[in-house]
Image (tube, helix red, strand yellow):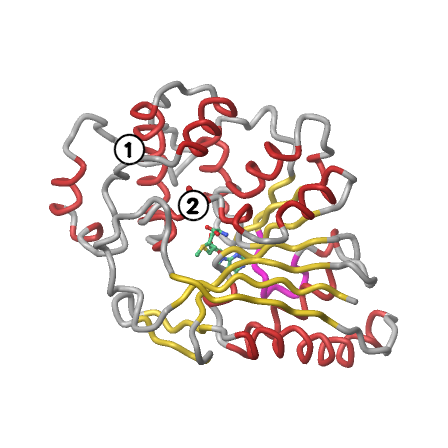
């Protein structure tokens, strides 16, 4: 069991945690947790998650694993109360739900550089490294997030600060110099529950940044999941009061193709890039918005007709 850290040098760490208290009552007593997108506990963990924590971290038994997860999850909730944290969606290890996953694992084994943008704890990079095996060059994995605390909490959650070779870099995707050291060096970008946080014009800026980061060649790829709907567009999630954007298959395809064209026109002179337009093949699917880890009666907060989109964009 990992004891909560209380060092002054780690202000994101919660203080005075009492692991024995009743988590359900605690959530009701704490107004910041009395929301549908904060779930105090998980009923049971999927077998694959238990196996992952037992083998990767070395914590034995579902109960001990759950307590460890609750401790870190509550620290992260204090940083920013995202539904993906409150509802344990990070335990989906969503990267492996993509139809592209087997191909991605193979490419990583062969040395591809993969960036997880908005990686939060870096859970998907850990899953990828685990599945790619001990001989895979995991130093080619990069995780970035606006919140440095999430990156640090990832090391606590996975107890691998001294052994995980991936690089974690705090960064704001909207900063002009975002990951400047990686420009033109990335083969694959994973966007887990990321795009929907931003308006359509902001997403065009995100794609422009991706264009700077990806190798300018066929096979460069972006994939991920985000909120979707039968008809895409701006969407206010009333429960949380957030203005989000849900994609449909047409809007996600248009985002990649037209933003890339736009970015190439803007950047071509500045960075000496070619003016030839790149072609993108974008595939996507819409499914039920949910998670293996959350109580199914926690519904309604996510908004009418909200679906889960999986997408892949590959440069031809
Ligand atoms: C909804 S969470 C998703 C986390 C994770 N990818 C997943 O699938 O569970 C979105 C993440 O994006 C990060 N983020 C938000 N704005 C960002 C920005 N401007 N630049 C980089 N990361 C950002 C947040 O800190 C958060 O960790």
Q: Is residue 4 above or below residue 252?
A: above
How many residues crowd around disc 2 within 10 Å: few (fewer than 14), some, or many (20 or more)? many
Query: Residue 73's spot in the image, x, y percent?
Result: 35, 40
The answer to whether 50 appears left or right of 27 in the picture is right
The answer to whether 235 appears left or right of 314 in the picture is left
Residue depicted at x 38% and y 60%: 289
Quarter containing the C terminus:
bottom right
- As drawn, the label of residue 77 is none
The boundaries of the magenta stretch are 171-178
Q: Nearer the viewer, mark 2 or mark 1?
A: 2
Q: Is residue 289 above or below residue 142?
A: below
Q: Secondary structure at mark 1?
A: loop
Mark positioned earlier in the residue sequence (2 or 1): 1
Q: Which residue is mark 2?
A: 90
Occupied quadrant, residue 40: top left
Q: Is residue 18 above or below residue 225?
A: above
Asked if the residues shown at circle 2 and circle 1 are in contact, with their CB atoms under 8 angstroms apart, the answer is no
Q: Which residue is mark 1?
A: 15
* Mark 2 residue CB less than 8 A from any atom of ligand 1: yes
């Amino acid at each position: 069991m990992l004891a909560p850290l209380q060092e002054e040098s780690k202000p994101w760490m919660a203080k005075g945690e009492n692991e024995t208290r009743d988590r359900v009552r605690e959530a009701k007593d704490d107004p910041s947790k009395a929301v549908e997108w904060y779930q105090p506990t998980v009923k049971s963990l999927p077998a694959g998650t238990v196996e992952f924590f037992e083998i990767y971290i070395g914590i034995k038994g579902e109960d001990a694993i759950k307590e460890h997860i609750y401790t870190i999850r509550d620290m992260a909730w204090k940083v920013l109360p995202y539904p993906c944290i409150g509802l344990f969606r990070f335990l989906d290890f969503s990267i492996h739900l993509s139809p592209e996953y087997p191909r991605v694992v193979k490419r990583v084994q062969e040395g591809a550089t993969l960036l997880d943008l908005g990686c939060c704890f870096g859970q998907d990079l850990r899953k990828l490294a685990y599945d790619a095996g001990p001989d895979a060059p995991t130093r080619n994995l990069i995780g970035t997030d606006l919140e440095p605390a999430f990156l640090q909490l990832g090391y606590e959650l996975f107890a691998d600060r001294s052994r995980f070779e991936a690089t974690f870099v705090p960064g704001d995707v909207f900063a002009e110099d975002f990951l400047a050291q990686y420009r033109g060096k990335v083969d694959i970008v994973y966007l887990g529950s990321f795009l929907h946080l931003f308006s359509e014009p902001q997403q065009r800026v995100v794609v422009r940044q991706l264009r700077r980061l990806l190798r300018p060649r066929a096979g460069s790829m972006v994939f991920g999941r985000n909120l979707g709907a039968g008809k895409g567009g701006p969407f206010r999630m009333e429960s949380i009061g957030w203005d989000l954007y849900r994609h449909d298959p047409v809007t996600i395809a248009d985002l990649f193709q037209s933003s890339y064209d736009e970015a190439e026109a803007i950047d071509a002179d500045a960075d000496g890039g070619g003016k030839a337009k790149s072609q993108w093949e974008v595939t996507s699917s819409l499914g039920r918005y949910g998670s293996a880890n959350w109580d199914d009666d926690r519904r309604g907060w996510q908004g009418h007709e909200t679906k889960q989109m999986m997408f892949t964009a590959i440069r031809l």
